[in-house]
Amino acid sequence: MISRFGDALRTTALPLLAVRLTDDPVVIASVTACGYLPWLLFGLLGGAVADRVDQRRAMWAVDTARGVLVAAFALVVGLGHASVPLLLSLAFLLTALQTLFDNASTALLPSLVDARALGGANARLMTGQQLAGGLPAGPVVPLLIGLGAWAPFAADAGTYLLAAGLVASLRVRPPAREPRPAGSTLRAEIAEGLRHLRRDRVLRPVCLATLLCNIGMGALIATLVLHVTRWLRVGDTGFAAAMTVYALGSLAGGLLAQRTARRVGRARALLLAGTVQTASLLLMGAVQHLAALLVGVLLLGSMGMVWNVNQTTLMQQRSPASMVGRVSAAFRTASTAGAPAGALLGGAAARHFGLNAPALLAALLFALAAAALIPAGRADVSVGAPHDGAATTRVAP
């Protein structure tokens, strides 16, 4: 959770630094695109490695490497040598390391909690990450930037190194794994995870819907700083306010995620979240007022948390214990595939159709995602199941 605070500092500060270096929407969007690209290149490999190694050790090693990397970046910025290529490189390298960290953490959690408590554990974990990271980061970033453009990145480096020390100090028994077949290769293990995802009648449409949403979010996130500072003309403070309200919405969504799933089922909870997010994006793109933006990001954040908790839990529950890392990697790689293109598409839309166009484009893509979820809602059997439905969702496709 500590490193999430640093992530939130960097995520808010990086686009603000980018707009100081260039005002080209496509160039600014490229920073976001580079932050997604490693999932396409290394995501599947990260999942296969996460199923093979000690996941706790992998997590603290990655956080140490990221801390050193961001500390070096802060030093370069402090010396006045910041540049767009440097921003692109940082975004790429951090996400390349994240492909191992995220898959390792997703694979580790089911071994730490009872299957019936998995949904609640995901909700508490993600809500705690927002509470520790997203909520305080928004108002803190302008204060740190007042010290210098380097300050948010120096703070981010410190949180990574502190988080690495905390994870390393944990005494967690590694999850039991079945011996790998003789001659098993990473390529064969990656293919096994892909086949499981392709054959599952719930995860397959959920993955497609998440892909469409990620294209839309890529377009929105890549240009949001321009939407706020240029279209709405509310400056850095308005951007920080939007990030803070988004974090507040995410906290509310963490409280709603489990209740929604118990009432309608996890797949239908995703459908509900996608529908509300579509409306929020339409509001943001159609009404040129700060209040409309804040209401929109509040709904976007709350329903985004409902989506993330239930999507992650579905994936964990419907994957064999020995394959969670690989299925997670297959899901994330496939669903994230459109985000770099979405970021560039958002930059092009902002350049040619106006700075509010990416929000409207995202609304269209979220509407298509909601339609793609209808088969998953019909196939999901978790409605009315006790607790999290773990006994009924881990079924053959």
Image (tube, rainbow, N blue to C red):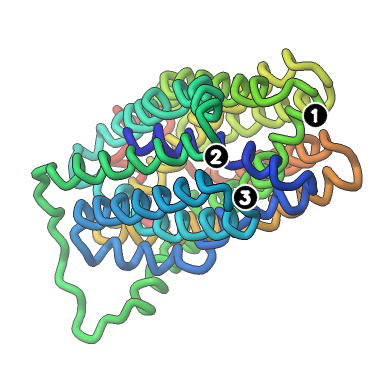
Quadrant the N terminus occupies: top left
Q: Position of residue 314 (x, y in %)?
A: 41, 43
Quadrant the C terminus occupies: bottom left
Asked whether the residues under the numbered discs 1 and 2 touch, taking CB atoms below 8 Å apart as contact, a structural biologist would say no
Mark 2 or mark 3: whose residue is earlier in sequence = 3
Q: Position of residue 222 (x, y in %)?
A: 68, 44
| Marks 2/3: CA–CA distance | 32 Å
Q: Determine whether, in the image, residue 185 is placed left or right of residue 380.
A: left
Mark 1 against mark 2, which lies toward the viewer? Answer: 1
Mark 2 against mark 3, which lies toward the viewer? Answer: 3
Q: Residues within 10 Å of mark 1 (few under 14, many from 20)?
A: many
Question: In this view, which residue lies farthest toward the right?
Answer: 352
Mark 1 or mark 2: whose residue is earlier in sequence = 1
- Label 3 amino acid? Thr
- Label 2 amino acid? Gly
The numbered disc on residue 32 is 3
Query: Picture quarter containing residue 287?
Result: top right
Residue at figure coordinates x 52%, y 48% from the top left = 79
The numbered disc on residue 100 is none
Residue at figure coordinates x 45%, y 63% from the top left = 43
Residue at figure coordinates x 83%, y 36% from the top left = 355
**Disc 1 marks which residue?**
285
